[in-house]
Image (cartoon, grey):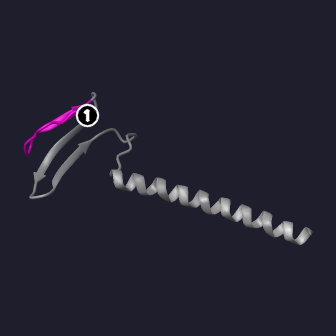
Amino acid sequence: MLVLQRKKGESLLLGDDIQISVVDIGADTVRLAIEAPKDVKILRKELAEAAIANQEAVADQEQIQKIKSILSSDRHSV
């Protein structure tokens, strides 16, 4: 991990086409501006983690429904 110190108005470059600039610094927040090509996906980490958890929950629910369906059909065939 690289840790950098930047002041308001300063930037850093990732590769040739992504620029991150410090727009504002508050007591407990930092506002960043990100310039990147449109095909680069930019998400806050907590939103990406929530999306993954949601996808896992949906998959679990689908599995539960399949098991219920199998158990229900087994009862009817006995």
Mainly helix, strand or loop, the magenta region? Answer: loop
Give the quadrant of residue 63: bottom right
**68 left or right of 48?**
right
> In the displayed structure, would residue 5 be above or below residue 49?
above
Q: Residue furthest right?
A: 78
- The percent position of residue 56, horizontal first and vertical second, equals 54, 55
Please rate how many residues cluster around mark 1, counting C-alpha atoms within 10 Å: few if below 14, some from 14 to 19, many from 20.
Answer: few
Name the quarter where the N terminus is drawn: top left
Looking at the rendered structure, the secondary structure element under dot 1 is loop
| Amino acid type shown at disc 1 | Met
Residue 21 picture location, percent across and down: 17, 42
Q: Which residues are magenta?
A: 1-14
Above/below status of 26 relative to 77: above
Q: Is residue 52 left or right of residue 75?
A: left
Q: Is residue 23 above or below residue 11?
A: below
73 sits to left or right of 14: right
Residue situated furthest front in the rendering: 78
When asked about the image quadrant of residue 16, the answer is top left
Pick out the residue farthest to the top: 16
Task: Provide the residue designation for mark 1.
Answer: 1
Q: Is residue 29 above or below residue 13?
A: below
Position in image of residue 19 (x %, y %): 22, 37
Does 4 lie within the magenta span?
A: yes
Quadrant placement of the C terminus: bottom right
Q: Residue at x 30, y 39 (%)?
A: 36
Please tell me which residue lies in front, 49 or 12.
49
